[in-house]
Image (spheres, grey):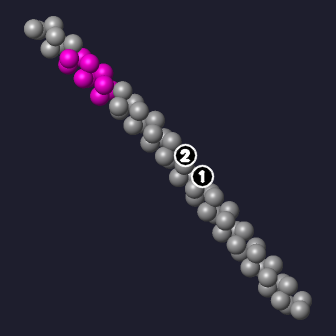
Amino acid sequence: MQNKYIHENFEVALVKDKIRESLDVLSSAYVKLRKIEVYVKKFDYKILKIIFLLDLNENLTL
């Protein structure tokens, strides 16, 4: 009986460890995605700025 109890506790500890590892990976991935989101927004802003300037330039030349 004691051996079964030790075995079950060991399995629970392994599962908890795997869950912690998974949460660390997910947390890291979330941070990376947030950084990518910031870069995309900056890039989007630059594209909009270029389009605006091109449109402005076209209107001035007409």
Count neighbours of disc 1 (C-alpha within 10 A) and say few if under 14, some if 14 to 19, many if 20 or more: few
Chain part drawn in magenta: 46-55
The verdict on residue 47 being magenta is yes
Residue located at (70% from left, 72% from top)? 15
Q: Which residue is mark 2?
A: 31
Task: Please identify the quadrant where the C terminus is shown.
Answer: top left
Of helix, strand and loop, which one carries label 1? helix
Classify 18 as above or below 11: above
Classify 5 as above or below 26: below
Classify 39 as above or below 54: below
- Residue 52 lies in quadrant: top left
> What is the x, y in percent for residue 43?
35, 32
Q: Which residue is mark 1?
A: 27
Residue located at (20% from left, 17% from top)? 55
What amino acid type is highlighted by mark number 1? Ser
Classify 2 as above or below 58: below
Taking the image as shown, residue 55 lies to the left or right of residue 1, namely left
- Residue 1 lies in quadrant: bottom right
Determine the main secondary structure of the stretch shown in magenta: helix
Toward the viewer: 59 or 5?
Answer: 59
- Residue 61 lies in quadrant: top left
